Amino acid sequence: MSGSAGGNDYTGDNVIHPQQFVASPGGRSSGPGGGGDGVEARLAKLEADAAHIQRALSSLQADVKQVVAGVGDLRVSAATLVEAQKHLATREWVGVRAAAVATVSVGVIVAAIGGLPALLRYLGVAA
């Protein structure tokens, strides 16, 4: 890049001059962006795209609100399950009850056949 003593005479390729953006008589800018009538079309497309993005974000926001509400429902369900589990029978509880039922059942059978002597005779233990 070279310049004059006043610093206003730039001739390098990477320098942008303000006159590049002045509209030419045909209504088109000679700037690097293409300018002119194409700007309005590109701007309209950008506006349409921005509107589409805004609708998508609104939809996404509604979906996130539903997910958050669903998480709250899941927390309640999980708490309900934990509380219900506290009241379920344990293995020990079932074992004790099963032994009690078996003992009562044997007692009923013994009483039904005539007492312990009859049971022993039936089993062949007593003569």
Image (spheres, rainbow, N blue to C red):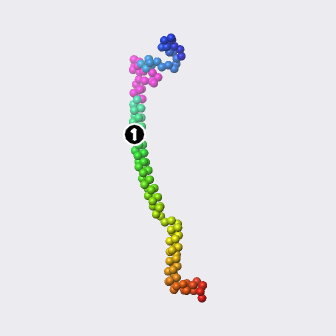
Q: What stretch is highlighted in magenta?
A: 23-42
**Three-letter amino acid code at the position of disc 1:** Arg
Q: Compared with residue 109, is residue 38 higher up or lower down, i.e. above or below?
A: above
Q: Is residue 32 magenta?
A: yes
In this view, the residue in front, 48 or 67, is 67
Residue extending farthest top: 5
Q: Is the magenta stretch mostly helix, strand or loop?
A: loop
Report if residue 122 is visible in the image.
Answer: no
Is 9 displayed left or right of 126 in the figure? left
Q: Where is residue 115 in the image (x, y as percent from the top left)?
A: 52, 85
Mark 1 neighbour density, 10 Å: few (under 14) some (14–19) many (20 or more): few
Q: Does the magenta stretch include residue 7?
A: no
**For numbered disc 1, what is the local secondary structure?**
helix
Q: Where is residue 23 in the image (x, y as percent from the top left)?
A: 41, 19
Name the residue located 47 percent from the left edge and 23 percent from the top edge: 32
In this view, the residue in front, 108 or 50, is 108
Q: Mark 1 points at which residue?
A: 55
Picture quadrant where residue 122 is located: bottom right
Q: Compared with residue 11, is residue 65 higher up or lower down, i.e. above or below?
A: below
Q: Where is residue 72 in the image (x, y as percent from the top left)?
A: 42, 51
Q: Position of residue 93 (x, y in %)?
A: 50, 68
Q: Compared with residue 13, is residue 66 higher up or lower down, i.e. above or below?
A: below
